[in-house]
Image: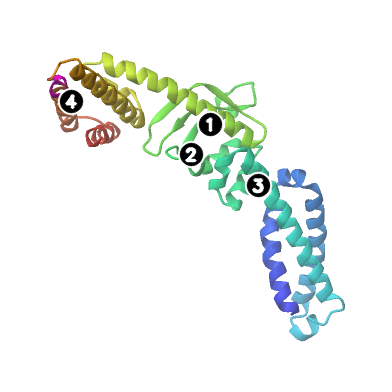
């Protein structure tokens, strides 16, 4: 019974030790639990040292009060784990994209509050289609202001989209990620409006394809196609029987242009965009 309990305590201790000993922020957020774990840590080390010095299972398991101590330690570790889970749940409620992350990943993020650049490794788990944020590190940029700023976002395909304005990366991680998310939406909204105008104005689609991100090209294409079909159907109801056939010719001409672009000398990224447009 002692050996079984010792192994259970060991598993819990190993997991929580990497959290409470490595992160000052977690200690500040959960001071009571951090203090409790510190006491458990001291007691646990005393018993493990005894076991190490006397590797005789029968003798070690008969130490006075060892079973009661381990039972009490197990209860306290479970209580700490419960409070830790509740703490993580509050963070997830503030920034729901944290639900996509495991507890270990989330704890690693929360433990890097002083160095926001280390959060980069987990950005792709929070935001689909975004690999990293474009961050300005004041130390390398030579700025007097010590605050890190996010100036844009990068996709896994190496597409880059600059934000409408920089987002200050400071304070609790979940709060500045909310600001980043808002800026993402605001930026993509502006780019989509520009893309719609550019699509209508541009006779040569090469420039339009190269200028805007792939998802916006597809969205722009979908919006304009729907709008053109609606107009054609309205013209048919007004007596123009050939409106839809005319639109079909126009669409076929557009797809032919895209096909010609694929055969041309364009970058790997632009080719991916054009292939996606043709498919759609």
Task: Decide which of tag 2 and tag 1 comes sooner along the chain.
Answer: 2
- Does residue 225 show up magenta in the picture? no
**Mark positioned earlier in the residue sequence (1 or 4):** 1
| Tag 2 residue | 127
Q: CA distance from mark 3 to mark 4?
A: 50 Å
Q: Position of residue 157 (x, y in %)?
A: 36, 37
Gap in Å between the C-alphas at discs 3 and 1? 20 Å
In front: 62, or 128?
Answer: 128
Front-lying residue, 100 or 272: 100
Q: CA distance from mark 3 to mark 2?
A: 19 Å
Q: Which residue is mark 1?
A: 181
Residue 141 on image: x %, y %: 55, 25
Q: Is residue 4 left or right of residue 204?
A: right
124 vs 153: above or below:
below
Magenta stretch, overall SS: helix
Pinpoint residue 4: horizontal percent, then vertical percent.
70, 76
At horizontal 78% and vertical 52% (from top left) the residue drawn is 33
Asked if the residue under mark 1 is in contact with the one under mark 3, i.e. CB atoms within 8 Å, the reply is no
Horizontally, is 68 left or right of 199 in the view? right
Magenta region: which residues? 242-246
- Residue extending farthest to the right is 64
> Of helix, strand and loop, which one carries label 1?
helix
Task: Please name the residue that numbered disc 3 is placed on.
Answer: 89
Q: CA distance from mark 2 to mark 1?
A: 9 Å
Provide the residue designation for mark 4: 251
Q: Which callout, 2 or 4, points to the residue nearer the camera?
A: 4
Specify few, some or many for label 4: CA neighbours under 10 Å numbering under 14, 14-19, or 20 or more.
some
- Placement of 75 over or under 6, stated as above or below: above
């Amino acid at each position: 019974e002692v050996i079984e309990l010792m192994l259970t305590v060991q598993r819990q201790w190993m997991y929580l030790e990497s959290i409470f000993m490595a992160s000052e922020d977690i200690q500040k957020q959960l001071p009571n639990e951090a203090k409790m774990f510190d006491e458990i840590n001291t007691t646990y080390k005393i018993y493990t040292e005894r076991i190490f010095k006397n590797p005789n299972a029968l003798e070690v398991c008969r130490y006075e009060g060892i079973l009661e101590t381990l039972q009490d330690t197990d209860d306290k570790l479970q209580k700490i784990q419960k409070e830790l889970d509740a703490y993580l749940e509050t963070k997830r409620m503030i920034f729901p994209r944290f639900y996509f992350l495991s507890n270990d990943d989330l704890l690693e993020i929360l433990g890097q509050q002083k160095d926001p650049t280390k959060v980069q490794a987990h950005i792709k788990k929070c935001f689909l289609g975004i690999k990293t944020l474009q961050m300005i590190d004041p130390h390398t940029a030579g700025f007097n202001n010590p605050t890190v700023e996010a100036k844009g976002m990068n996709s896994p395909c190496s597409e880059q989209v600059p934000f409408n304005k920089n987002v200050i990366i400071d304070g609790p991680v979940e709060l500045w990620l909310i600001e980043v998310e808002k800026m993402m939406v605001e930026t993509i909204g502006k780019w989509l409006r520009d893309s719609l105008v550019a699509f209508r104005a541009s006779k040569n689609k090469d420039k339009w394809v190269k200028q805007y991100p792939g998802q916006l090209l597809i969205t722009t294409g979908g919006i304009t196609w729907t709008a053109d079909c609606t107009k054609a159907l309205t013209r048919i109801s007004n007596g123009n029987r050939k409106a839809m056939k005319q639109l079909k010719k126009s669409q076929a001409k557009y797809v032919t242009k895209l096909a010609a672009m694929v055969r041309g000398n364009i970058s790997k990224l632009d080719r991916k965009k054009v292939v996606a447009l043709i498919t759609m």
